[in-house]
Amino acid sequence: MKKVLTTCTYCGCGCNFYLQVRENEVVGVYPSKEHPISQGILCVKGWNVHEFINHPARLKTPLIRKNGELVPDTWEAALKLIEVRLNSIRKESGPDALAFLSSAKCTNEENYLMMKLARAAAGTNNVDHCARLCHASTVAGLALAFGSGAMTNSINEIEDCDVILVTGSNTTEQHPATGNRIIRAVDKGARLIVADPREIPLVKYACLHIRQRPGTDIALFNGMMKVIIDEKLLDEEYIELRTENIEELKKIVDKYSLEYVEKITGVPAADIKKAARLYASSKKASIIYSMGITQHTCGTDNVLTLANLALLTGHVGFPHSGINPLRGQNNVQGACDMGALPTVFSGYQALSSEDVRKKFAKAWGVDKLPDKAGLTVVEMINAAAEGKLKALYIMGENPMLSDPNTEHVEVGLKKLDFLVVQDIFLTETARLADVVLPGTSFAEKDGTFTNTERRIQRVRKSIDPVGESIPDWQIILKIAKLLGYDMHYDNPSKIMEEIASLTPIYGGVHFDRLKLFGLQWPCPNREHPGTQFLHREAFSRGKGKFSPIEHTPPAEEPDQEFPFILTTGRMYFQFHTGTMTRKTSQLHREHPEGYVEINPADAKALGLRGNCQVKVSTRRGAVITRAQVSTIVPEKIVFMSFHFAEAAANRLTNDALDPKSKIPEFKVCAARIEAVR
Ligand SMILES: Nc1nc2c(c(=O)[nH]1)N[C@H]1C(S)=C(S)[C@@H](COP(=O)(O)OP(=O)(O)OC[C@H]3O[C@@H](n4cnc5c(=O)[nH]c(N)nc54)[C@H](O)[C@@H]3O)O[C@H]1N2
Ligand SMILES: Nc1nc2c(c(=O)[nH]1)N[C@H]1C(S)=C(S)[C@@H](COP(=O)(O)OP(=O)(O)OC[C@H]3O[C@@H](n4cnc5c(=O)[nH]c(N)nc54)[C@H](O)[C@@H]3O)O[C@H]1N2
Ligand code: SF4
Ligand SMILES: [Mo]
């Protein structure tokens, strides 16, 4: 049997494993013992990653819609149709009538080509991807505070922290390899504070569980900062030397007395004090956060508030101390780094800079590049619904299940003149397309993924493409050509050479340097060993900046008609829209259907028994699902995952956006629960 070392396609931890191959079929997997993250361990998704690769439902040929039905056809016919339709729409309505969704499941090289396709070939900045639904607020917030929007430390540093504050991250279920380091740290004596409305598995290891009401994190952390300032636990020397704007922060925070904070958050004053003292008085203190912080209309402000807390106590810029947004998808860090975003090129080089535009235009051999900021994910759907966006090209995303307010998404997608979906399975979104193109899975291509700790790692081809599928990077080259723009690369390493030449933080990244451990950016040149933690002596922007932030309530709050707060997220055994995990028997068996978690007191008041059918409704829609009666959720708060099309949580969610980062409020909306009799 052949074995091929590669990087996991599920979460952002970036474990490495060997795929076992027999006769062009991936039949097994085992972890790499030498790899810094895997260390011989995988989570259940990693151990079962081989099953979907050769699943019979893989897309094996292009599909074209004929008389309302998607039917198999040749690549030639599919590409011809795309050529005619995209060019005529561009001619009639201009380049901004086209938009492109890139993919955090795909490689860096593919994401780079996708943004090049949008900008150089189609002539629009309408390019974005699921980071908009995920850590857009991190990228915006941390760039303002520190100058760089990525995890400041490395996963292995967590193990030697004194104090870890985990908020809005269900780490053991969603980033298992990272959760494992938190547990190891607690075993070694670290104190763990969990601030999460739900009783997540990590709570077992915590010395303190703060259960704030969803959407009240700013008040909570401002309250902690007030204790720190009042009790003089702040790091005066660090503040003086490395930060600016402290006075502005102090003015705002002063208002957040513990009584006031308790009223907003529901958290007892004593707990806030305890958390503040623990966090401020330890030397090696790390904040770990994820979607519970980012997916709010105040998402960027939440991130800025955490940055304030870390700056106030001098807890950034050292090993083990920092702010660590856990990036979700296997390559969402990379898709952002590659500039698959509507306002930046690769390496976060701003579109608004004429010098940057000229640099890319010259390298790409075009006269000029569009300078108008493009549309974000939800804005694309809105523009489609308004008839302004005519064509959408989606690679490796499933917005029919993953975007907020599904009914509206469906209206938008159906209104488009032309929809192309490039995926490995026939998803709910692909079913609406005019043309479906079969890409290949991570097992059938070469390239790189960048994990959550900025580690650029190799993805290696282990089998030939399934059926007539083609690696996504090669498909993009074909699409560029039919839009009249030629790109030539023999293989993905050549694409990385171009990325390195145009992207300072990836300047020293070359395939021949990415052996067992990869390289962590910034890595500016060939001799540079990569960077374990950020902001060592100075912040990327110079000084760390405090921002005065006020609590703002969520866009929708419970009332008489919709008395519950609905918050949504994930489960250990399933991944996102289930395209891969629901085709993996070991995973699906463990968690075959969705449910709504509801507190026993609420269940009793509504006359619900465990496992009974309930209707969950919001102002956007309703779904029928099963009640999981559990103290994991507090009273008046219910939780659903968005993995299941049959009870799709996003039929319910609110598409209200954070004005600063355009991330939707997946974590709070008002809902009603009724028994189905
Ligand atoms: N098994 C599995 N793993 C995954 C994924 C998957 O689908 N399945 N997806 C990957 C991706 S792309 C991502 S982004 C990550 C996401 O990883 P996480 O962010 O860890 O996952 P979520 O379940 O979305 O939400 C995390 C927590 O936020 C809490 N929360 C809800 N509201 C609030 C609030 O107002 N404030 C605070 N502080 N917390 C709140 C929830 O109770 C939940 O425990 O997971 C990645 N890993
Ligand atoms: N209610 C609610 N909704 C949410 C969230 C939430 O917490 N609550 N979280 C949001 C977050 S954080 C995220 S990241 C998004 C995720 O949203 P999406 O990215 O839309 O979800 P996925 O199911 O991961 O979609 C990835 C698609 O890529 C395909 N694919 C896999 N590998 C390849 C490949 O190599 N090539 C190609 N071409 N396709 C491939 C898969 O089959 C799948 O259809 O969901 C968001 N939606
Ligand atoms: S922890 Fe994440 S990267 Fe590691 S095996 Fe599990 S899903 Fe894959
Ligand atoms: Mo995500």
Image (spheres, rainbow, N blue to C red):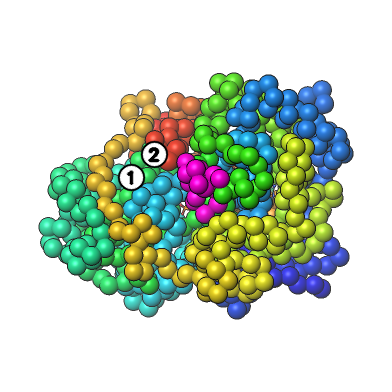
Magenta-drawn segment: 345-358
The image quarter containing residue 51 is bottom right
Q: Residue at x 55, y 74 (%)?
A: 527
Residue 166 magenta-drawn? no
Q: Secondary structure at mark 1?
A: helix
Q: Are marks 2 and 1 in contact (CB under 8 Å)?
A: yes
Locate the N terminus and report the quarter of the image it occupies.
Answer: bottom right
Say if residue 305 shows up in the picture: yes
The image quarter containing residue 608 is top left
The picture places residue 616, in percent across and down from the top left corner, at 48, 33
Query: 301 or 278: nearer the eye?
Result: 301
Asked if residue 22 lies left or right of residue 156, the reply is right
Disc 1: residue Cβ within 8 A of ligand 1's nearest atom: no
Within 10 Å of the Cα at label 2, are there few (<14), some (14-19), or many (20+) other Cα atoms? some
Query: 499 or 591: nearer the eye?
Result: 499
Q: Is residue 302 above or below residue 236?
A: above
Cα separation between marks 2 and 1: 9 Å
Q: Which mark is residue 568?
A: none
The picture places residue 378, in percent across and down from the top left corner, at 52, 34
Q: Which mark is residue 301?
A: 1
Residue 349 magenta-drawn? yes
Q: Residue at x 22, y 69 (%)?
A: 281
Q: Secondary structure at mark 2?
A: loop
Asked if residue 216 lies left or right of residue 299, the reply is left
Q: Which mark is residue 660?
A: 2
The picture places residue 534, in percent across and down from the top left corner, at 41, 65
